[in-house]
Amino acid sequence: MSNRTWVCLNCRKSYRRSQSVESVACGICHQTCEYVHWKIHIPSPKHEKGWDQFWETYLREKALIADFLRDKSLNSVPLDLLNQHFHRDSQG
């Protein structure tokens, strides 16, 4: 079984844990870490501008997915980081 990547946005520390783990707390600040899809390249925390831009986009897209799943009136959601679109079948 492969591992998942979890990242603490506060400490900029990443962790690899089993897929069976549902959440990870940072070993430094104890805040909940963010899971990152395996297809996504995370910029180095040393490059602050790229890191900040990545997380702004990632969290925005994560919110878009949640909105799409919750709001049945949304028909399409673009996801630039995964190079995908979520589409809802328009045939009721």
Image (cartoon, rainbow, N blue to C red):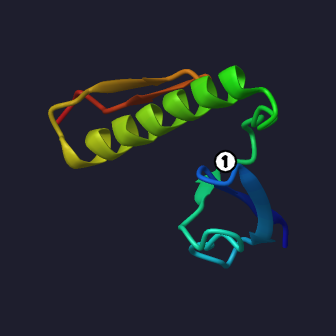
Position of the C terminus, as image quadrant, is: top left
Left or right relative to 65: residue 42: right
In the image, residue 27 sits, relative to residue 34, either above or below, namely below
Q: Amino acid at mark 1?
A: His
Q: Residue at x 31, y 33 (%)?
A: 88
Q: Residue at x 54, y 68 (%)?
A: 31
**Residue that numbered label 1 is attached to:** 37
Position of the N terminus, as image quadrant, is: bottom right
Q: Secondary structure at mark 1?
A: loop
| Image quadrant assignment for residue 80 | top right
Please state the horizontal and vertical placement of residue 5, each as a whole percent of the image. 74, 57
In the image, residue 27 sits, relative to residue 5, either above or below, namely below
Left or right relative to 18: residue 37: left
Please state the horizontal and vertical placement of residue 25, each as a whole percent of the image. 61, 73
Left or right relative to 28: residue 78: left
In the image, residue 24 sits, relative to residue 7, either above or below, namely below
Q: Residue at x 77, y 71 (%)?
A: 17
Residue 89 seen in this snapshot: yes
Bin the neighbour count of mark 1 within 10 Å (Cα to Cα): few under 14, some 14-19, many 20 and up: few
